[in-house]
Amino acid sequence: MNKTSPLETSSIGYKVPGSSIYIDPKEPVACAIICHAHGDHAVEGHETVYCSEGTAALIKSRFKYAAKTIHIIPYGEIFEIQHIKFSLHGAGHMLGSSQIKWVKDGVTVVYTGDYKRESDKSCEPFEVVTCDVLITEVTFGKENKVHPPAEESVKELQIHKDVNLMLGAYNLGKAQRLTRLINDIHPHLRVMIHPKMVAYHKIYESLGFDLGKWEPYKREQFKNEKGIVYLVPPPVLLNFRPGTHFLRAFATGWDEKHVRFDFPFYVSDHADWPSLIKTILESKAKDVYTIHGDGEDLKTAPELSNIEIHTLSE
Ligand SMILES: [Zn+2]
């Protein structure tokens, strides 16, 4: 087996072979395509960036100097760089998250970036994109690792309506998704958010994603009133000593991250095992490369026995 890797890897990150186009580079470069605005995919200081409208708004908010030029590319529209045709497609991970598709030497490649297939009213949906070669994230690539639906986790908050809840959530993506979910499922609860989340909430809303009711954190009200869910960044959650007037939980897909808190609260923005299998099969790719995690279990999955699964070095 002597396959040509669909991406070259170096300390700077992934590069499309035969070009100087980087995908989610970790250092400033002349030409970058960025799949979403999380810190492990987006850094500041590039010369030229290609990304979705949501990603552009978020990186401009996150970074003092995101890039000299940002080209905003609508989903599905073909754009050409260095004679290679690219397009972006919804990844369902957070606002603006994109899969990146390109055609080179007659081979169609799709790089998923982070993605989920669960419904999420706070961002654009995942799109199935067919290709010859699929590069998929495998953050939760463990056989039979299944995320319970986020709605179920949020529904269980019913039992906590007489106390307040301090809920750890990443500032960008998770916090906006939870704001929308809590509004939909528990309209009687108040959602307070940490100051670091406010700008991101406003960007989501400015791009047409209604998050429902929310308010910035007010210390006295959280202390003296009931029925409040206060969304905080994980470090803040860890630094707060457990209080008598509130419970603590952390919204994540990782089992081991729940143990320090009052109850487990499973909400993940990544594909679980059934989603990974489904995405690989629906892509119709005959070659699959895994990134961001351990893809070993996929190599022996009976559903994928006709597909070559490779690990792409990082
Ligand atoms: Zn991400």
Image (tube, grey):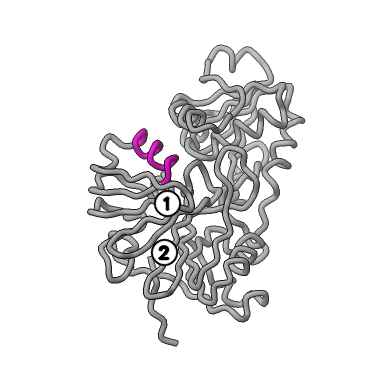
Residue 248 located left or right of residue 48: right
Q: Residue at x 50, y 68 (%)?
A: 134
Q: Is mark 2 within 8 Å of ligand 1?
A: no
Instruction: Tell me the amino acid under the disc marked 1.
Output: Cys
Query: Magenta residues, as a range?
Result: 52-62
Estimate how packed mark 2 is, as few (under 14), some (14 to 19) or many (20 or more) residues with alpha carbons within 10 Å: many
* Residue 57 lies in the magenta-colored region: yes
Residue 123 percent coordinates (x, y): 55, 41
* Image point (27%, 66%), residue name: 19
230, 81: nearer the viewer? 81
User: Quick one: quadrant of the N terminus?
Assistant: bottom left
What residue occupies the far bottom of the structure in this picture?
Answer: 1
Rendered position, 221 above or below 181 = above
Question: At 72% across and 31% down in the image, what residue appears?
Answer: 185
- Mark 1 or 2: in front is 2
Q: Would you name the residue on which mark 1 appears? A: 35
From the top left corner, tell me how far across and down residue 88 is, in percent.
45, 54
For residue 140, the mark is none
Q: Is residue 110 left or right of residue 179?
A: left
Point out residue 31 in the picture as x, y percentages from the top left corner: 27, 54
The overriding secondary structure of the stretch rendered in magenta is helix
| Count of labels in the image | 2
Q: Is residue 134 magenta?
A: no
Asked if the residue under mark 2 is in contact with the one under mark 1, i.e. CB atoms within 8 Å, the reply is no
Instruction: State left or right for residue 257 relative to residue 160.
Output: left
Q: Residues within 10 Å of mark 1 (few under 14, many from 20)?
A: many
Q: Viewer-proximal residue, 129 or 286?
A: 129
Q: Check the image and name the residue furthest to the right.
A: 159
Which residue corresponds to mark 2?
102
Q: Which badge, 1 or 2, is on the more N-terminal residue?
A: 1
Mark 1 vs mark 2, CA separation in Å: 13 Å
